[in-house]
């Protein structure tokens, strides 16, 4: 799995490409997010549009990522979920935990909306 990092203002967008599975992306994702949080960058969007498959280890890492960012006082949101990933999150009841977006603009803007509340 590859991760490309982009920033729009103070929001970091991580474009994930490839499978998020045990030994093939889970550690890469963990390291990347820990690095961002340690730099004080706590508004993170995971773009999963080019992730064809997530196994239980990958799902576990996405949940751990969410927990890591939340504990640091930040916020993690998901973008571009495929039907397969949406179904997986729905079955595991995690769809209610994550804020998900179809549009990058909506995902990025949601951080300022929550800051105003």
Image (cartoon, rainbow, N blue to C red):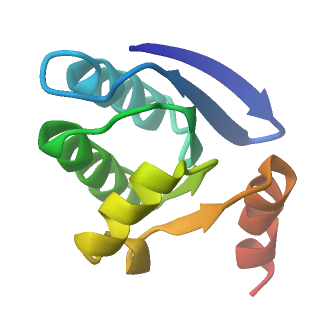
In this view, the residue farthest toward the bottom is 117
Where in the figure is residue 109, as x and y percent of width and height?
83, 61
Residue 91 in the image: above or below residue 80: below
Foreground residue among 15 and 6: 15
Location of residue 41 by image quarter: top right
Q: What x and y, as percent, mark residue 12?
A: 65, 36
Q: Quadrant of residue 49?
A: top right
User: Which quadrant of the rendered structure holds the N terminus?
Assistant: top left
- Does residue 50 lie above or below 4 as drawn? below
How many marks overall? 0
Q: Position of residue 64 (x, y in %)?
A: 23, 49
In the picture, measured across the screen, residue 40 lies left or right of residue 69, that is right
Q: Tell me the quarter of the image containing the C terminus.
A: bottom right
**What percent of the width, then of the height, locates residue 83?**
51, 55
Q: Is residue 28 left or right of residue 75?
A: left
* Quadrant assignment, res 35: top left
Viewed as shown, does residue 61 lie left or right of 43? left
Identify the residue at horizontal 71%, vertical 24% (top origin).
Answer: 6
Q: Is residue 48 above or below residue 114?
A: above
Q: Residue at x 34, y 31 (%)?
A: 34
What residue lies at 23% left-to-right and 16% top-to-bottom? Answer: 24
Residue pictured at 80% horizontal, 80% vertical = 116
């Amino acid at each position: 799995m590859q991760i490309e990092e982009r920033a729009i203002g103070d929001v970091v967008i991580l474009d994930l490409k490839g499978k998020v599975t045990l030994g093939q992306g889970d550690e890469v994702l963990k390291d990347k997010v820990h690095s961002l949080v340690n730099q004080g960058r706590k508004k993170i969007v995971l773009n999963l549009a080019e992730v064809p498959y997530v196994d239980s280890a990958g799902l576990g890492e996405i949940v751990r990522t969410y927990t890591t960012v939340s504990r640091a006082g930040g916020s993690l949101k998901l973008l571009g979920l495929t039907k397969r990933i949406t179904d997986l999150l729905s079955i595991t009841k995690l769809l209610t935990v994550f804020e998900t977006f179809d549009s990058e603009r909506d995902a990025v803007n949601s951080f300022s909306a929550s800051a105003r509340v």
